[in-house]
Image (spheres, rainbow, N blue to C red):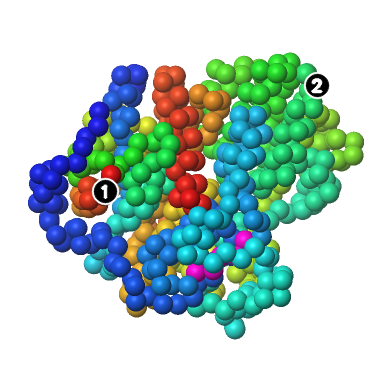
Amino acid sequence: MLGPKTLLATVPAICLLAAASAEESGFSVMPEMCAGCHGQGGLSPGPIPSLAHLDAEAVLSLLESFREGEIEATVMNRIARGLTDAEIASLATYFGSLEE
Amino acid sequence: MRIRKTATSRRKLLKIAGASALAGMIANRAAAAVRGKVVVIGGGFGGATVAKYLKLHAPDLEVALVERTKEFATCPFSNTVIGGLNELDFITHGYGGLRAAGVEILHDSVVDIDDGRAKIRLAGGEALAYDRLVVSPGIDFKWNAIEGYDESAAERMPHAWSAGSQTALLRRQLEAMEDGGLVVVSVPENPFRCPPGPYERASLIANYLKKTKPRSKVLILDSKDGFSKQRLFEEGWERLYPGMIEWVGFSDGGNVVEVEPKQMIVRTDFEEFRPDVANIVPPQRSALLLDTAGLAEGGDWCRVNQRTFASAVAPNIHVLGDACLAGSMPKSGFSANSQAKACARAIVSHFQGESPPEPALINTCYSLLSESYGISVAAVYRLDKDNQIASIPGASGTSPPNAPAEYRSLEADYARGWYASITAEMFG
């Protein structure tokens, strides 16, 4: 059961999605898949947390925690379970590189 | 908690992640050399998004978007207008942002797709040539599939399943209804646009009626025996609107077969109802325009390559959104937005002479049951062994049942946040 305290802890939640198959394509991940919720360039205009201010290590740690269920979020536990280690690392690097 | 960027941790992460190799892979390759002409039909979630991202990835690409309306009213969040939480203006967006992004916007209707000559013809007489065509025109209704339900019937019994004047009409009818009235919402068989939409609508209608006309009822007549997020909707209805919403599935006689709009009669296989407001969501198919190029192959929907969204029968034409068959993805605005991003990458790869990337796609559908009660279903999709888009086991599912109020409230906030983000992305 999720309590309010756990939920508050997830407010700086992040949502990410990656694509695979770097060998076959020019793009290994599609960080724009996250923009539908978290805003273009990681800047969210509404109540969903922005990502642009996060550094790469924080993104990596949050995504891994969501995937392993160590932090209870809303949709991010479900979505992070679809990501591989390499994708999480790639997305962390990408979002870490954004300017605030 | 705000975690600020620091140079140190960025360096550390780069090391963890394999340094420059990964950083290089995710950088958008500046595609300045990419030249060509892409025409996009339809300025909704699929079309607006693909146009935007084509210009972002390849600024020198010529991108023209043809859309009938100068202002686009979104189906997502139209239920909040019907329920009186927002005005129609809130869900209505112009194309200034896309124009500023370098997309040529033409407000016109397409009358013909001539793929043999790689041209489309507009109602205004103009012909547009393309190297690649993206078609994201959404749905058309199967008029008279429910006997008596045609375009004129929709003026009395609105579908409100394309947003705008129909949304406003249904809202006006609810406002005019007396306390103690009956609202019928009829739901078609699968597949149709926005599977949880009718149930969100019933919820937000009940939310309005509870405040203003509490003796009224909402009756959902369904052509199916189950529905999206059913357990969560039923739990919410019990909690928020006890006794106000009744759902009748197919086996219990919920299948609407006939309407008589003048008499306000709705008939199912077994019964006859005389509601005060009838919201008939009719059966659907891909937009009829697609038939001018045979893209639906005589059926209802368009088969596409699941990696590039190129039509199975016309490889220079990509079909996105509600009109296409995208494996197990639902027909939602979020799905169309994801598909458009994969498609934009695929088209740029094509012009670069490279293989298209393998997409991982996402869909999250939020539904509001009240201002402070939201639920969701989310999934990540990849190509399966048969090259069909399929949800990843373990990476999909709904909000938990029996969650505390804070959870539902947070998801209601995130529903509003999603709408703010995705519409800013498309139209901003």
Secondary element at image label 2: loop
Q: Which residue is mark 2?
A: B178
Picture coordinates of residue A12, whole percent (x, y): 30, 32
Residue at 33% across / 24% down in the picture? A7
Q: Nearer the viewer, mark 1 or mark 2?
A: 1
* Magenta range: B63-67
Residue B78 visible within the image:
yes
Q: Quadrant of residue B407?
A: top left
Q: Which residue is mark 1?
A: A99
Q: Is B10 rendered above or below residue B400? A: below
Tell me if A43 is positioned left or right of B207 in this view.
Answer: left
Q: Is B80 rendered above or below residue B284? A: above
Residue at 13% across / 51% down in the picture? B14
Look at label 2 and name its amino acid: Glu
**In the foreground, B54 or B393:** B54
Residue at 35% across / 19% down in the picture? A4
